[in-house]
Image (tube, rainbow, N blue to C red):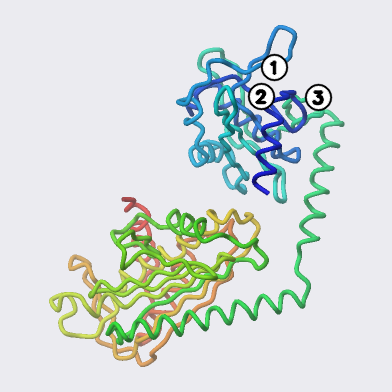
Amino acid sequence: MLERLHEYLKDKLDYPVETKDTDYKSAVKFDEQTDFAAKLVKHILGFANSGGGYIIIGFKEKPDKSLEPDSALTDEITASYEVTRLCQHVEKYLIGQDRIKIEVYKQPSERATYPIISIGRFPEYPFVCTKDYTSSSTGETILESGHIYIRTEGARTLTVKAPSEWSQLIRECIKASQEIEAKKPTEEQGDQWEGLFSAWVKNENNNAMTEMISAGFTQGFFKFIIRVPYGLDQIGNAALLEIARKSECHNTGWPIGVVMTKHEYKPASLADGIRAVINTGDEFDYWTMNNHGHFFFVRSHQEDTSDQALTKGRKVLWFDVAIWRISEIITYAANLCSELNLKQGDEIQLTLSYEGLKGRVLSAAKPLRPFGRSDKCTEDKYEKELELRLTDIMPKLKDHVYQIAVGLFGLFDFYKPDRATVDSIVDEFLNARR
């Protein structure tokens, strides 16, 4: 498949002609601060709203309007087109929308290696520009908030205004809708996927418990499972590893789902995904991600191996650490969905549980945060299941955290946390970017 793609791209280098799905640009280094980068965003939006296409860097127009290789193309220019950097720049103009599927291929030829930007079509709704860009040197308005751009049959990128342009956009929307309907699972497929997911969770839970008990961590743990929409294309293990790495929340020194490189801690490649088992002696983590994007995580209670001066010899649950970790779990879920390129309208299921609660009292990890309750928890387990729409995960983060905190802490003799206190700890988490 990839070989056929490169043959196709090679033809575009050998026979350069601008069409509805192919554009050529001169050899200009990618720099987010330039007018060229803003124009690139405009063309990418246009292609994404018109069925997708390619932008090839390294060709210039001759006086007769035909195209020829640009001798100014260098390895430095080619290297500047890096997919993560390009995607991050484009996303500044797509606030609150799905990601555009962008790939950057470095296509070699006899003359040079050409950066080719591949743009996928919008998944459900057309992309709308959400930010203005005006050239500081010419005063030209290159991008306008609220505008929808398309790529026309005449190989031009335009704002949708004329009836023919609206007609083209509507046709693309119909195609996208038909593809979505065609991909919807039947009831039988849904039952099958649910069965496979449940079997996977059961297997990972058994593995995690065996590993954790063998390592000597027997007093309790918290666990969460992220079930993403069924039917996603299978993801290779190398791609899963990169998704896991990018999903980490860098607000703490020991992130949830941490991807380590040390031999005994680094994730292993499995037949159905990746898995990490991390036993530091003080803490135990077990996490796994399967080839359909589902995620499973277990961590031992930090309180059980902490300095006795902090716990005063009691079995405790630190309410402030719990709020921090719940915030991180939900943020991790949002990051994972983003890295999986899920659509904004998609829903995920997040199941969070705390076990080994019986006999614990609520306390605080921070000495300067006075808190203490002598009422012991009589239940051993708390579990909460949330259906989260992607568009609401981070905007409603504090609501989600408070909802879980009320249920969890309510097991400690009906204790109800103060909303302002919970919100302040969530803010601490959000502001602790490392």
Circle 1: is it few (<14), some (14-19), or many (20+) Cα within 10 Å?
A: some
Q: Secondary structure at mark 3?
A: loop
State which mark lies toward you, 2 or 3: 2
Front tag of 2 and 1: 1
Q: Secondary structure at mark 1?
A: strand
For label 3, the residue is: 154
Mark positioned earlier in the residue sequence (2 or 1): 2
Q: Which amino acid does the dot numbered 1 rest on?
A: Leu
Q: Amino acid at mark 3?
A: Gly
Towards the viewer: 220 or 345: 220
The label number, if any, that marks residue 24 in the structure image: 2
In this view, 160 is above or below 410: above
Q: Cβ–Cβ below 8 Å for labels 2 and 1?
A: yes
Point out residue 84 in the picture as x, y percentages from the top left corner. 50, 42
- Please report the residue visible at 56 percent of the width from the left and 64 percent of the height from the top: 293
Residue 181 circle label? none
Mark 1 to mark 3: distance in Å?
16 Å
Lateral position of residue 278 relative to residue 147, left or right? left
Nearer mark to the viewer, of 1 and 3: 1
Q: Is residue 360 left or right of residue 9?
A: left
Residue 335 point in image, percent of width and height = 49, 56
Q: Which residue is mark 1?
A: 67
